[in-house]
Image (cartoon, rainbow, N blue to C red):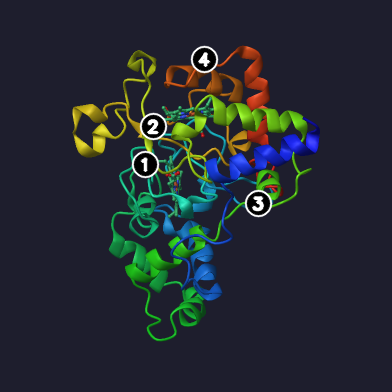
Amino acid sequence: MNDIAYANNLQSIAKTQIGSLPVSSPGSENDTIAIVELGNKIFRDINLSENRIQACITCHPLNGRSAGMDRQSTSRGTFGQLGKRNTPTILNIGFSNVIFWDGRRNQLYDQAIDPFINPLEMSLPSETELIQRIQNDPTYQEYFINAFPEDPNPTLHHVRTSISAFERSLISNSRYDDFINGNLIAMTRQELDGLKLFMEIGCTNCHSGFTLGGNGFGRLENPSLYNPNDLGKFEVTGDPNDRYVFKVPSLRNVSLTQPYFHDGSVSTLNEAIERMNAYGLNRNIQKQEIDTLILFLKTLSDKTKTN
Ligand code: HEC
Ligand code: HEC
């Protein structure tokens, strides 16, 4: 097969097996620019952490080439307290219906307030304190008037609505999508070999859909490989079958978001992929195939981000 025929063939298989990112997230129909701007302001406001040092953007950096996570194994909260989980990127989070590594939320609206009052993160004593700080800051006034002209009073509902609207606006744009959407030369022959392998050996069984993950859970076949300090979904459901069950992360932007896994315990993509041999693939991955898979995974990165 010549290169174009090969590309054509893979494009049609990947279109149905994986797909490409839509231009907007579900639920964003009523997200006006003013609502997103208010969410963006709140996301960056360090005054909304207990000691006025940390904002959402501290752990989820987005400016310029930053890809939405801080590259730490686990992050420190506003008082320097060490968390137990790796910070995921929030790029494309609007397409996920499993939120957090243990899936304790399934909607951004419900998640939006959690970090402010999480004692491992921004550590505010209460939701009331959050709203009071926003009310006491006169720079918010015009943002609320523009975002919610009929009812510009800061409320938890408005904070949830605007943060989730901002999060839904974070959609990446990759060479892989260019390829699926018609540009047959957007990916090289070797990158296409990686895409082919990715679909053949069963990565898509778990890293499924156009987000390549983010909407389901998985578990290692050999639990002894897990860190015993984190029981994953079990911590939410109490169901023994959920021990060491974690969210299957989206692989979009994955080459920019090391270290990997829920505990940030693996520092290279090579090692992360090798570990997938313990996840019930269609067959074992050979060492030399890992490089090919990495070439494909790199095409999933946003074209403007390098982290
Ligand atoms: C101290 C660092 C830190 C701060 C500050 C922080 N986050 Fe996070 N964020 C994390 C970590 C760690 C996780 C994963 C936690 C877990 O799974 O239990 C996470 C998870 C998330 C997720 C879910 C991602 C996924 O793939 O499931 C979203 C959305 C999110 N944060 C948004 C926010 C917003 C909005 C704020 C501000 C209100 C914020 N974060 C502040 C560290 C932080
Ligand atoms: C049985 C389900 C399953 C299959 C099949 C699977 N994965 Fe995963 N993958 C997961 C889960 C679950 C995690 C998160 C594990 C954790 O945090 O402990 C993960 C994590 C990853 C990570 C780290 C991402 C991050 O942000 O931390 C990479 C890279 C990865 N998988 C690549 C692959 C590749 C490539 C394949 C095919 C060779 C594959 N996976 C097959 C379930 C699966």
Secondary structure under badge 3? loop
- Of mark 1 and mark 4, the one earlier in the sequence is 1
Coordinates of residue 287 in the picture (x, y in percent): 62, 13
From the viewer's perspective, is residue 266 above or below residue 250?
above
Q: What's the CA distance linking mark 3 and mark 2?
A: 30 Å
Q: Residue at x 48, y 23 (%)?
A: 265
- Of mark 4 and mark 3, the one earlier in the sequence is 3
Any part of residue 195 in sight: yes
Q: Is mark 3 within 8 Å of ligand 1?
A: no
The residue mark sitting in front, 3 or 1, is 3
Q: Residue at x 67, y 24 (%)?
A: 292
Left or right: where 141 falls relative to 107: right
From the viewer's perspective, is residue 35 above or below residue 215?
below
The residue mark sitting in front, 1 or 2, is 2
Q: Amino acid at mark 1?
A: Leu
Q: Amino acid at mark 2?
A: Lys
Q: Which residue is mark 4?
A: 284
Any part of residue 53 in sight: no
Q: Residue at x 79, y 34 (%)?
A: 3
Q: Amino acid at mark 4?
A: Asn
Q: What's the CA distance linking mark 4 and mark 3?
A: 31 Å
Q: Which residue is mark 2?
A: 84
- Of mark 3 and mark 1, the one earlier in the sequence is 1
Q: Which residue is mark 3?
A: 173
Q: Is mark 1 within 8 Å of ligand 1?
A: yes
- Of mark 4 and mark 2, the one earlier in the sequence is 2
Q: Residue furthest bottom?
A: 150
Secondary structure under badge 4? loop
Give me the disc on residue 120.
1
Q: Is mark 2 within 8 Å of ligand 1?
A: yes
Check disc 3: other Cα within 10 Å, few if <14, some if 14-19, many if 20+: many
27 and 193: which is toward the camera:
193
